[in-house]
Image (tube, helix red, strand yellow):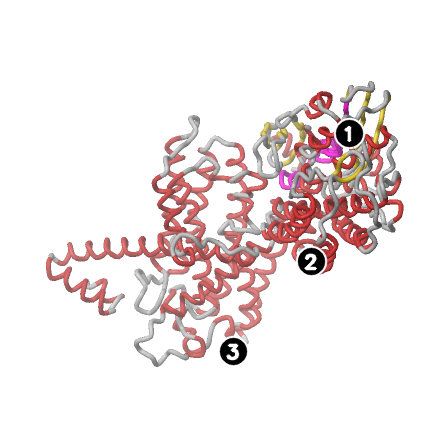
Amino acid sequence: MTNQEAQNKIKTEEYFINMGPQHPAAHGVLRLILTIDGEIIKNVEPDLGYIHRSIEKMCERDSYQQIVHLTDRMDYLSSHINNEAVCLAVEKGLEIEVSDRVKVIRTILDELTRIASHCLWWGVMGMDLGALTTYFYAFRDREMINDIFEETCGARLTMNYNVPGGLMFDIHPNFVKRTKDFIAQFKTKIPEYNLLLTDNVIFQKRTKGVGILTKEDAISFGVSGPVARGSGFSSDVRKHHPYSAYDRVDFKEILLTEGDTFARYQVRMMELWESVSIIEQLIDNIPEGETKEATKAVIKLPKGEFYQRVETARGELGVYINSTGNKNPYRVKFRSPGFSNLSILNHISKDVLIADLVAIMASFDFVIPDIDR
Amino acid sequence: MNFLQMNIPLNITKTISDWIFSIMPETAANYTIMVVIAVAYLALFAVAGLYLVLLERKVAAWFQLRIGPNRVGPWGLLQTMADALKLVSKELTSTIKIDKFLYNLAPYFVIVSALMAMAVFPFSKQFQAFDINIGLFFLIAISSIGVIGILLAGWSSNNKFALIGAMRSGLQTISYELSVGLSILTMVLLTGTLQLSEIIEVQRTGGWLILQGHVPSIIAFMIFMVAGTAETNRAPFDLVEAESELGAGFHTEYSGMKFAYFFLAEFINMFIIASIAVVLFFGGWLSPFGITENITWFPEVIWFIIKVLGLIFLMMWFRWTFPRLRVDQLLTLEWKYLLPLNLMNIMLMAIVIWLNWTI
């Protein structure tokens, strides 16, 4: 009796299972409605809205300085980069050119944010695959970045360091030294990460060839960030549309062609090295200059549309501001990386096991408030 | 029948047994002693289980750059006691649509099967409750009852996550039972007996079995540790609970003491697997190189405990280092690699014994 005949003879039924809104692998309140045959997933339907706070609508009510603070709460692991996106858009509207000092400091902090975010993702990826120890290793190193941020910005998670026109205040005198200390230490930690998780046979078996995303699909679904680069889709905003000081640093855009979970993992691990190298290039020569250009107390953008894209740790974040010339915008739209990346989930999770879905989701690095806003 | 004196001629127990025999007729005294031993064992293993939990938390903390529990009692020694107290005093909640009878029965299957195995444990020459001539067989038989409890728990909870966990447990235990059994069989070829105390006595003159059987013994040991870890449903084989996939797996719907039974059973099972390994490969209660063999007052149970804790540490090391396997990889590992290797290993062991190549 062949496999097909056996399947025809034994009648089985697919069933539904709710993965979330409270589920350890979702890292937030994402509800996935799974259609499962045994343990094989037939359909994944994400159900959003459990943490929708209508940030875009609240932006229409607030002044431009206040909008910056709201973006902290979108992708909380890239809060500095989110802030910067709004600030850049507003600066574009006001036609302000910030000083080199601001640009360089913003870039350094962007990359520190990216390292912190990737650290957390690495720990959580291990945890999702059952290796709990990674989480604590990652948090040890992320803690040092948080300390740097705490000293300079006064906050550890929601920075609010960027304001339209520059930075809220100058960096802390210890900033350069502590960042250098961190970079020196962190360079010894990345090999440790590889030793603990990347080189593990079980880990590689769990991730290689799982959830393959082709380049064509990545482009047509609007996927961005490390997920797209793992499939060979060159989508790094820092490279293609440089902002802040990214045009003056030398870094590689990591592109892998496999498109599987392991490739997405590798892209992020290599990006850690790139971030380290960017910080090393900038940290020694932060130029002198103003930390904030003078803006009016009440910022009014001219009538028109303004768009700014930045590369967060998860992918491309776009900020669209439609202004009618008032003190608050007429309409604000955020193009968040998580939302676009989530749209591909059903496409690549067909006929995989539940454990694979968890691995795929971990490799996408979802931050749910970023998806829902 | 002077059942207790035969097995435990230590002075304290002898005094107790003499006293019991002096105040009641012989039959009643025998039954009383059985109950006393049973209660003592239960208490011993409840405490042992609790301290294994504490050890696990401490070991996990050391692996994870943490300190671990250190607030309740000195070095956190009373932490798990407090946890157990909390679990005992907790309300037993359950959902409405459960199969009440099976739901309540399941935890007892798991904990009773774990505790029953304790009966034949050879802690030391004098410290063994029940030295039957099919001790090893009894251990394997008893330890495979536990999976029924897990299956029942998953089925009766009326929860899809629990059901998936239970089904995984079924296929995992059935598969790895083979490897456990066959690797034990390999060693039985060498000892020629199933009685645990005799297996240990064999090693008094010839050296530990892992040395006596050299290559096939070492292979058998490695297979036994892998399969044994899988049998206890611990990481990297913890697909049954797989918290990032299934929430808590088969015991999702259990709370309070019933959950504690499952939890405790896991640790006692770990103790069982480590004990079997110690008896079969590392000479049970025998001291290394016979260093304490001539010291009559030295309690041999200490060697047994040290060896068992060493192997338990190894299993904890697995847990806090490796990621979890996937279901199909779990089965591939067993049926495509461990089982053929095991069968060849038995042949190898037979050849080694036939040609008298043992050390």
* For the residues bearing labels 3 and 1, Cβ distance under 8 angstroms: no
Q: Nearer the viewer, residue B94 or A308?
A: A308
For mark 3, does the 10 Å Cα neighbourhood hold few (<14), some (14 to 19), or many (20 or more) residues? few
Report the number of discs.
3
Horizontal relation, residue A236 to residue B102: left or right? right
The residue singled out by tag 3 in the image is B359
Quadrant holding the N terminus of chain B: bottom left
The mark found on residue A189 in the picture is 2
Mark 2–mark 1 distance (CA, rounded to whole Å):
34 Å
Mark 3–mark 1 distance (CA, rounded to whole Å):
72 Å
- Is the same chain shared between marks 3 and 2? no
Q: Nearer the viewer, residue B123 or A159?
A: A159
Amino acid tagged 3 = Ile
The residue singled out by tag 1 in the image is A335
* For the residues bearing labels 3 and 2, Cβ distance under 8 angstroms: no
- In terms of secondary structure, where does tag 3 sit? loop
Instruction: Look at the image and tell me whether residue B228 can be seen.
Output: no
- In the rendered image, residue A36, in percent from the top left (x then y), is placed at 62, 31
- As drawn, the residue found furthest toward the bottom would be B294
Question: Closer to the camera: disc 3 or disc 1?
Answer: 1
- In the rendered image, residue B90, in percent from the top left (x then y), is placed at 37, 38
Nearest to N terminus: mark 2 or mark 1: 2
Residue A252 belongs to magenta span: no
Quadrant of residue A68 within the rendered picture: top right
User: In the image, is residue A14 above or below residue A275?
Assistant: above
Label 1: chain letter: A
